[in-house]
Image: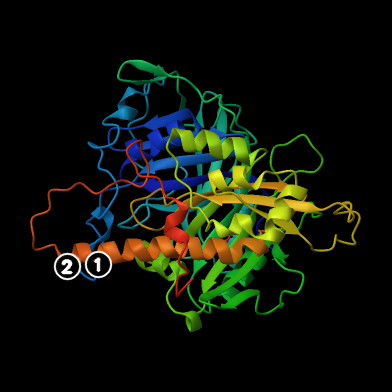
Amino acid sequence: MAAYLSRLHHISLHVTNVDKIAYELVNNFKFNLFVARLTEKSKQLAFRKGAAVFVVNERPNKSPLELNGVTLSSKRGISPSESEPGWTNNIQTGKKNDKDPNCLYDVHPHYSVDTASNVCFEVEDVERSFKSLHNIGCEFLVPPTEVCDEYGLVTYSVVKSIMGNVNHTLIDTSKYKGSFLPGFQEVENVTKNGTLVAKSRETCPITHFDHITYACSRRWTPQVMRWYERHFGFQRFFIDSNEDVDEGYVLNKEGIGLRLTAMEYWKCSETGITLPFTDDKQPDCKFVIAESLPEQGRNQVDTFLEQHGGPGIQHIGLYTQDIVSTAQTMGQAGVHFFSPPPAYYTEVGKQQEMEDAGYDPQMLSQHGILLDTDLRQAQTDSSCQTTDTKKKRYLLQVFTKPIFSEDTFFLELIERRGASGFGEGNIQALWRCVQAYMDTERAETEAQGENTSQPQNVTPEPKHGHNNKPFTAEHCRTPSSAALSSL
């Protein structure tokens, strides 16, 4: 292993419409905007909820990506003038920002669509990590670089991963005492139409990033696993107790063609990824690879690869201590979630499972929340796990609709009540639900492409916002002929 990672620091999004994403993260997803870096030509905003930090970067406005004659980056979504015009212009940092137009702690991806493309890790020694990784063939986009202000010094470098456009910033903050990173200024307040936007205090207890899922090209999973094992010390995490070591967790029947393989940092390792919690049982962030299998036809992993322009981060799981209150708060603010078919909540076995866990099936149905019982046996290594095998362990989860204008990146809410897996019992229901939605979206896109010669005066409806039509279970009642990982 060449790099010794301390913890996950933040995840970067690169978007054209910073105003839209910033507004949705604060207003809909209840993140707090706490620091910003504003230059004459770009914006970098940092949003925090618990230990989960997103850095939203304004990317250069490239030419729209066209596939099959359809302009993907403008087929849906809202333009800056249609969302919250100039919302980020109301940010007050209290200090004058630097005029360096470059993107600090990252690089601008050469992509024509919005993307989540950087997972930043803290390391103890950037220079040592750089030398070690460079010696075994890693490509660095930014060499070790120092940035400082009155609060101290930070050193970072950016390494290109094997996974599509995903990069990893390696950063050492041990000599820095500021609130985030040099170059970022604390946000004093944000106003909307002259009214102060207060920090989020709603019942929305998100604590950290639970997992990151990659959408991978076919037959590419083994190479990705080897790259992370060799360079960052990741080890295999078995999603299912009967999972094949070489094949991973495979669903290849009834219209679902999916291979899932998970990685984690060794929890008992001195160099494992940790998050800043005082509890001895510190949570970790797993990495999952979703690969489409060809036998069952086209599915949403293929859709991601097409619309994103290649492999990348498909979705990120946000851990919440109370998924019901979190989903309710976000739903009332304008977030739309996928819903499984109504029959999911009325099946005798599933209904009993929910009641045994202490939940009302009708209440879970209102928010589209799925529940799964983790049946795997506890690890025998007592030094790493002390779970009581007699107590049932549950996992609850729900997916948001894509937050970019393409059918690419989305978020997941996940609550773990002792469970360590990813809801294996929910994969089929969730897969079919998302696939049905994407099949509908694709049909509408193709129809739009056929009508491009005719005048169009209708503004496409955004995925998020107060004027959205909610996505209901009606969209999921007919199983798709091709079937998203339930991660």
Residue at the (27%, 55%) spot, across then down = 73
Against 98, residue 159 (above or below) is below
Considering the numbered disc 1 on the image, is that residue within a helix, a strand or a loop?
helix
Residue at image position (36%, 68%) is: 306
The C terminus: image quadrant: bottom right
At x 26%, y 31%, the residue is 85
Residue 327 falls left or right of residue 473: right
Residue 311 vs residue 199, the one in the foreground: 199
- For mark 1, does the 10 Å Cα neighbourhood hold few (<14), some (14 to 19), or many (20 or more) residues? few
In percent of width and height, residue 99 lies at: 32, 32
Q: Which residue is mark 2?
A: 450
Kindly indicate the quadrant of the structure image that contains residue 349: bottom right
Left or right: 6 with respect to 407?
Answer: right
Identify residue type, mark 1.
Glu
Classify 24 as above or below 124.
above
In this rendering, the answer to whether 206 lies above or below 448 is above
As shown in the figure, which amino acid type bears the numbered disc 2?
Glu
Q: Which residue is mark 1?
A: 446
Q: Position of residue 114 (x, y in %)?
A: 36, 52
12 left or right of 270 in image: left
Residue 238, image x, y percentages: 72, 67
Asked if residue 194 lies left or right of residue 218, the reply is left
In contact (CB < 8 Å): disc 2 and disc 1: yes
What separation in Å lies between label 2 and label 1 (alpha carbons)? 6 Å
